[in-house]
Structures are given as C-alpha cells and as structure tokens.
Amino acid sequence: MLHLLERRGRTATICPSDAARAVYEGDGDGWRALMEPVRRAAGRLLAAGEVEITQAGRTVDPARARGPVRIRRAG
C-alpha cells in the first residue's frame, strides 16, 4: 500500500482493491479474496501512523466504517 501511495500525489488515495489487485498473481477476480487481509494490513498501518482511512473524504475508524473506504498517507 505504501508503495502504491508513493507513486501518487501527496494527497492521493487508493482503494483497498488497488492493493489487492497489485499483489494478486492470477487472472480474473481472485483478488477479491485478498480484500479482508488488505483491510487488516491497512488497519496495522493506521495504528503505526503511516496511513489514514477515509470515507467520503473524512477520516474514519475502519472497524466502524460501512461501505467503500480509501487509504491515504498520514499527515
């Protein structure tokens, strides 16, 4: 996730599916099985102060967020 964010602008965000697709090594939609591990990894990066999790442009607690979220660099 951090690598994907580094390749974008300072305030840019990524979707968790961007990270899942980046690490999935197959064809089709098998990346979907990686969505929960990606969300857990984002939670660890959040706890470490590396990223923020947003929804509709506002910072949210990923454990309480329902629906699509975005990930951006902290700070």
Image: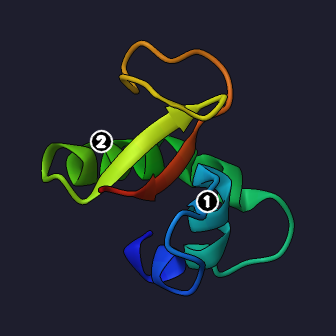
Q: Which residue occupies the foreground of this view, 23 or 9?
A: 9
| Place of residue 20 in the rendered image (x, y in percent of width and height, measured from the top left) | 59, 62
| Place of residue 17 in the rendered image (x, y in percent of width and height, measured from the top left) | 66, 55
- Within 10 Å of disc 2 (Cα), the crowding (few <14, some 14-19, many 20+) is many
Given the image, on which type of amino acid does mark 1 rest?
Ile
Q: How many marks?
A: 2
Residue at horizontal 50%, vertical 18%? Answer: 65
Q: Secondary structure at mark 2?
A: helix
Q: Is residue 68 above or below residue 12?
A: above
- For the N terminus, the quadrant is bottom left
Q: Is residue 6 above or below residue 75?
A: below
Q: Which residue occupies the foreground of this view, 35 or 75?
A: 75
Corner quadrant of residue 57: top right
- Within 10 Å of disc 1 (Cα), the crowding (few <14, some 14-19, many 20+) is some
Q: Which mark is residue 74?
A: none
Given the image, on which type of amino acid does mark 2 rest?
Gly
Marks 1 & 2, CB-CB < 8 Å contact: no
| Place of residue 14 in the rendered image (x, y in percent of width and height, measured from the top left) | 61, 59
Q: Which mark is residue 43?
A: 2
Q: Which residue occupies the foreground of this view, 52 or 1?
A: 52
| Place of residue 24 in the rendered image (x, y in percent of width and height, measured from the top left) | 62, 73
Residue bearing mark 1:
14
- For the C terminus, the quadrant is bottom left
Residue at horizontal 56%, vertical 65%? Answer: 19
Residue at horizontal 72%, vertical 59%? Answer: 30
Is 66 on the left or on the right of 36, as rendered? right
